[in-house]
Amino acid sequence: MAHNDDSFFREVNEELRSDQLKNAWSRYGRIAIGVAVLIVVGTAGWRGFEYWDNNNSSQSGDRFIAALALASEGKNDEALSALGTIETDGTGAYPILAKMRAASVQQAKGDAAAAVETYKQVGNDNTAPQAVRDLAKMRAAFILVDTGSYDQVAAEAEILSAQGHVLANSAREALGLSAYKAGNMPQAKQWFKLIADDAGAPRNVANRAQIMLDNIAATGKAP
C-alpha cells in the first residue's frame, strides 16, 4: 500500500511540475524567445560593427600613408587635400593625426600662420589625447618663437613648463628663446637657468641652455 501511495504521489508531483512548466511557458515563453533573439541580433550587430570599424580604420590608415607619401614628395597641396579629407571622414585616431600632419605640411610650405592655427586647434580639442594636445601646443610655440611675440609663445608653452611635465624643458627653452629675442635678458636667463638646474633635463637641451646663459652673461644685461 505504501508503495502504491509513493507511486501515486510521484505521478501527482510530475503532473504538477508539467502543469507549472506549461503555465510558465505560456506566460514567459514569448519573453524568453525575445531575449534569445536580442542576444543573437546583438551579437551579430556587434560583429558587424567590429568588421565595419576595422575595415574603415584600415582604409583610413591606407589613405593616411598615401597622404604622407605625397608630402614626402613635396606635393604639399595634394597632401593637404588628402589630409583634409581624412580629417572630415576618417575613423579612429586618423583625423587628429591628419590634422597634426597637415600643420607640419603648412609649415613646410612657409605658411607659419596657418600651421600655428592648425596646431592651436588640436591643442584646444578636448576629444584629442592629452599628449597629442600638449605636443601641438609645443609645436605652435616653437613656430611662434620666430614669428610671434613672447606673449603668444607663453600662451602655448607656459602651461607645459611646470616641473615634472614631460615637455617642461622644451617649453622652457621656447620661452627662453622668445624672451631673448624680445631683448628681455633677465626673463630669458630665468627660463634657461631652470633648464640648467634640472638634473632630469635632456643633455642636448641642457647644453643649449648653458650656451644661452653664457651669451646672456656676455651681454651684461642680466644680473
Image: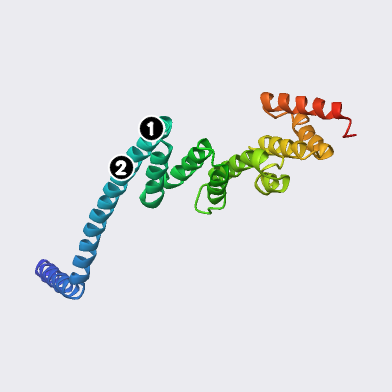
Q: Amino acid at mark 1?
A: Ala
Residue 69, label in figure: 1
Neighbours of disc 1 within 10 Å: few (<14), some (14-19), many (20+) = few
Q: Amino acid at mark 2?
A: Gln
| Residue 220 horizontal side relative to residue 86, left or right | right
Give the residue displayed 81% in from the left and 37% down from the top. 190
Residue 111 falls in image quadrant: top right
Give the residue displayed 42% in from the left and 47% down from the top. 95
Q: Position of residue 101 (x, y in %)?
A: 47, 40
* Camera-side mark, 2 or 1: 1
Instruction: Tell me, yes or no, whether the two marked residues, 2 and 1, touch with CB atoms within 8 Å.
Output: no
Give the residue displayed 33% in from the left and 38% down from the top. 62
- Considering the image in quadrants, where does the N terminus appear? bottom left
Q: Nearer the viewer, residue 43 or 219?
A: 219
Q: Position of residue 98 (x, y in %)?
A: 44, 43
- Considering the image in quadrants, where does the C terminus appear? top right
User: Would residue 91 be seen by someone viewing this image from the given angle?
Assistant: no
Q: Nearer the viewer, residue 119 or 204?
A: 119
Residue 5, label in figure: none
| Mark 2 secondary-structure assignment | helix
Q: Is residue 202 above or below residue 144?
A: above
Q: Position of residue 83 (x, y in %)?
A: 40, 43
User: Would residue 11 be seen by someone viewing this image from the given angle?
Assistant: yes
Residue 169 falls in image quadrant: top right
Q: Position of residue 89 (x, y in %)?
A: 36, 51
Q: Is residue 36 above or below residue 79?
A: below
Q: Which residue is mark 2?
A: 59
Neighbours of disc 2 within 10 Å: few (<14), some (14-19), many (20+) = some
Question: Which of pointers 2 and 1 lies earlier in the amino acid sequence?
Answer: 2
| Mark 1 secondary-structure assignment | helix
Q: Nearer the viewer, residue 17 or 108?
A: 108
